Amino acid sequence: MNKKERYQLFVEHFSKHQPEAETELEYTNPYELLVAVILSAQCTDKRVNIVTKDLFKRFPEPESLAEADVAEVFEYIRSISYPNNKAKHLVGMAKILVGTFGSVVPDNVKDLQSMPGVGRKTANVVASVIYNVPVMAVDTHVFRVSARVGLTTNAKNPLEAELQLVKYIPEEVMNVSHHWLILHGRYVCQARKPKCDECQITHFCKSYGKFN
């Protein structure tokens, strides 16, 4: 099976069985999603959703977060990974969001990345989810699953994986395919012990049989 055929089977399977996959982060507007994605770096969505309930009550819009004391933000997110840095990033991000972008979350990756705490993956997630920009955000799940399945080959870092994925995945399913890979990695193709006996894509997975 060549790579093109594997991608075709990947798209066909998930388009049929999981056509409306979406982020598990809870948010009600672009500002909240941006905050949640910043917090989600190296942290579970479940934990982020617990934390943001109170965080968004205290800082319901970017203006209030921009004026916040970093120490107070830290208290709300202290159970998140790297809370010190993320508290600083959130306040810094909000200041630029308000001062430079008029409190409107940018619709392009370049502007998004100009804010503290917003790397390429975070920018791609926000642009994809909010504005339907056909970009591929590569987190640890996407990086792992795409390599195991055989969608990427010898990718040394997330950027290399991203460039391979966008080359083959059709633009019309680019946004949802990001969630296909994340959810498959979160619940089936797990890092330490993938659930190959429950997997429905073994017929085109390049690594099937290697974990038994």
Image: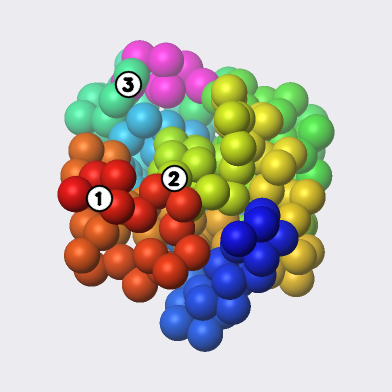
Q: Are marks 3 and 1 in contact (CB under 8 Å)?
A: no
Residue 54 tag number: none
Q: Secondary structure at mark 3?
A: helix
Circle 2 residues within 10 Å: few <14, some 14–19, many ≥20:
some
| Residue at (21, 30) in percent of width and height | 79
Residue 143 is situated, as x and y percent measured from the top left of the image, at 50, 39
SS category of the residue bearing label 2: helix
Q: Is residue 105 visible?
A: no
Mark 1 or 2, nearer chain start:
2
Disc assigned to residue 194: 1
Residue drawn at (32%, 21%) of the image: 83
Task: Name which residue type carries label 3.
Answer: Pro
Mark 3 vs mark 2: give the one in front: 2
Q: CA distance from mark 3 to mark 2?
A: 32 Å
Q: From the viewer's perspective, tell me whether residue 18 is left or right of residue 31.
A: left
Magenta segment, principal secondary structure? helix
Q: CA distance from mark 3 to mark 1?
A: 30 Å
Look at 50% across and 42% down and name the residue there.
Answer: 147
Check disc 2 and give the amino acid type: Arg
Pointers 1 and 2 in contact (CB under 8 A)?
yes
Give the residue furthest to the bottom. Answer: 16
Q: Nearer the viewer, mark 3 or mark 1?
A: 1
Tell me the amino acid under the disc marked 1: Pro
Q: Position of residue 201 (x, y in %)?
A: 41, 68
Q: Which mark is residue 148?
A: 2
Task: Name the one closer to the observer, 70 or 2.
Answer: 2
What range is drawn magenta here?
A: 83-89
For residue 196, above or below residue 34: below
Determine whether the residue tagged by mark 1 lies in a helix, strand or loop.
loop
If you read the primary sequence from the N terminus, does the residue marked by circle 3 or circle 1 appear first? 3
